[in-house]
Image (cartoon, rainbow, N blue to C red):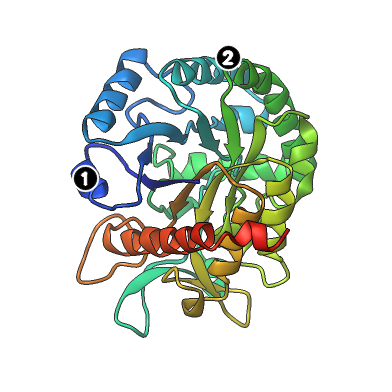
Amino acid sequence: MKMTFRWYGESDPVTLDKIRQIPCVSGVVTAVYSVPVGEVWRSEDIDALKRQVNKAGLEMEVIESVPVHEDIKLGKGDYKRYIENYKENIRRLAAAGVKCICYNFMPVFDWTRSRLNQPLADGSNALAYYKADVDKMDPAKISLPGWDASYSPSEMGELIKEYKEIGEEGLWKNLEYFIKEIMPVAASCDVNMAIHPDDPPWSVFGLPRIITNDRFLALYDDVHHGLTLCSGSLGCIKSNDYTAMVKKYGGMGRIHFAHIRNVKILDDGSFEESAHMSDCGSLDIVEILKAYYEVGFKGYLRPDHGRMIWGETGKPGYGLYDRALGAMYMAGIWETLEKAGFDKMHR
């Protein structure tokens, strides 16, 4: 397992020199953020980014993310050109030593939350998803960090209408076409493609959400075709046995990237993000890491969204302090498993 940390580039208040001071972190997860979605990243920009990361004493082996253009998801317009551009980005990132690319196929919106700074009992604040709040939102008039802000309200409304018209099966069809196009390139470059599950994994604003079950892995039979398994996404449904998912998909060698955070699931199915420790939320982080250890996980892991603590301000979910605590908490569990020979005891 390699512990990594999300870094949003020069504009990120969490700087590389600060990340370097977290003892267990070997590299950052980042991207070239200046290129419009769907276009080719310049090799010079990729190389410059890698030099900057390496100069700080860190690795750049994971890119999160290479966004998928809406035309590809909808199977319209310039989707074929955008797919060719996507293939070229895989090639260029591979040439720079990138070994894993995280991406998603969520319609219009990336992760969705209703509150960005919900106060918690301990005085910190965190991201939260309250169903009653979401039901009152107008999706054409809201924005969250990380979303594509280039659409006007009318354009957003039209996009939502198009997705509702193609439905889940139409989205599956377009995803399958995309996967069958890019995966031969990724396999030839030895790059693991790791799709992120829908967050949350249910329909939001009436849009189809499909990365919630086993159907995705059946689209292409190659180990490079895999998952970014996210505990905060798939783990926010009480009926999901997340530890069993780690054992199943990890045993298949299909988890290339692990996002781990804890969530407190509420009675109505809403949830609040919490500190990483098991007792702070609804997920047993120790059992989750045991499962990763048992399957011999060799991929990349990062602490996912953190609370804002100790008066810190910044990008919601992506402050330094709580994510650093989460990284060290998980590294401590992993070291204990290694030194106790946990896998040998349970064979």
Residue lying furthest bottom: 121
Residue hosting label 1: 15
Above or below, 322 relative to 184: below
Above or below, 293 relative to 135: above
Residue 202 in view in this figure? no
| Quarter of the image with the C terminus in it | bottom right
Determine the image quadrant of residue 232.
Answer: bottom right
> In the image, is 163 to the left or to the right of 215?
left
Q: Residue 99 placed where, x, y %? A: 50, 28
Above or below, 30 relative to 278: above
> In the image, is 49 to the left or to the right of 38?
left
Name the residue: 65% across, 55% down.
294
Identify the mark nearer the N-term, 1 or 2: 1
Residue 84, label in figure: 2
Indicate which label's residue lies in the foreground, 1 or 2: 1
State the count of labels.
Answer: 2
- Of the pair 338 and 105, the residue shown nearer to us: 338
Q: How crowded is mark 2: few (under 14 residues within 10 Å), some or many (20 or more)?
A: some
